Amino acid sequence: MTRIGRSDLDVLPLNLGGNTFGWTSDRDTSFAVLDAFISAGGNFIDTSDSYMASIPGNSGGESETILGQWLTARGGRDDVVLATKVSRHPDFLGLAPDNIAKAAEASLQRLHTDHIDLYYAHYDDPDVPLEDTLGAFDSLVRTGKVRYLGISNYSPERISEWLAICEANGFAKPVALQPHYSLVAREPFESTLRPQAENFDLGVMPYWALASGFLTGKYRTQADVDGAARKRIVDGYFSPEGLAVVDELAVIAAAHDVEIATVALAWTRQQSTVVAPIASARIPGQLDALMASIDLELSDAELRRLDTVSAAVVTN
């Protein structure tokens, strides 16, 4: 297990992403993925109140709803570290204090729980004074509805401002940072956000750690990309430089007799400040490669090879 920042949250160093639940995974398939994850020793699940509002026919909160139904059916709430986010649900946009309070209540109801273990500000809201936002988050912690706070998609400057306001007001400080980071998206995390994580003792949970499936090796041609449910996202990674990263991952994977995704996640997990990369599984069969990354230790030489080839990728 690994500790998240200054918290007492101990997690397996793989964070199961809930963004497939209610989208590419229906309720029954989502239950099967969750059951398999827990059976394999997993305990850390990430979602958002906005998942999957962008899908036609959805209204937001579908992932949380499925997770809540699963928790009710299976029990064991205290054995799971549950993370969700606020600011992007269509009915609860932004980070005004009243909105945060209402959004948190809605998430608690959908999740069928009385507390959220890790509650992220999903995106910054420059229209609301940050002190007001942080006061609302602090209130959730003080009342026990939220155990710990996290930051996602904030600039380094705003992260510094966040911590300064907490210090000045005695507010609950964040313990986690959730940035976009992978072998094909190393910046701006490495140069600007990782120093913030080090300075403020924030445990890092990178999202899109598999680049929406690109780092599994399943997108080798433009035809592969064109037929993907995540085409819009994967297009941003598909390039000769990106494919060279996949090729190097394949060589290392073959040497260890593991999947390409396993190596990609192992590289991310072995980076400074990273606690648990976030990765999703559409079906239970995809979990084996993800879970194998926990025990795979890449050598210094292998890490350098991946560092070198990925340095040529231009981040979009």
Image (cartoon, grey):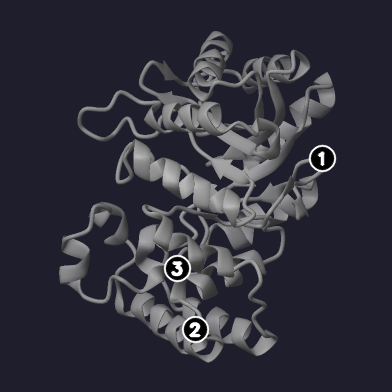
3D distance between C-alphas at marks 2 and 3: 17 Å
Marks 2 and 1: CB-CB under 8 Å?
no
36 above or below 263? above
Give the residue type that dot 3 points to: Val
Q: Is residue 267 left or right of residue 279?
A: right
Q: Position of residue 175 (x, y in %)?
A: 74, 40
- Residue under pointer 2: 253
Assign a secondary structure to mark 1. Answer: loop
Q: Residues within 10 Å of mark 1 (few under 14, many from 20)?
A: few
Q: Residue at x 42, y 62 (%)?
A: 286
98 above or below 94? above
Assign a secondary structure to mark 3. Answer: loop
Q: Position of residue 208 (x, y in %)?
A: 46, 55
Q: Nearer the viewer, mark 2 or mark 3?
A: 2
Q: Residue at x 67, y 69 (%)?
A: 270
Quarter of the image where one finds residue 131: top right
Give the residue type that dot 1 points to: Asp
222 above or below 207? below
Task: Look at the image and tell me in which quarter the C terminus lies.
Answer: bottom left
- Residue under pointer 1: 8
Give the residue type that dot 2 points to: Ala
3D distance between C-alphas at marks 3 and 1: 32 Å
Q: Position of residue 231 (x, y in %)?
A: 24, 56
- Residue under pointer 3: 184
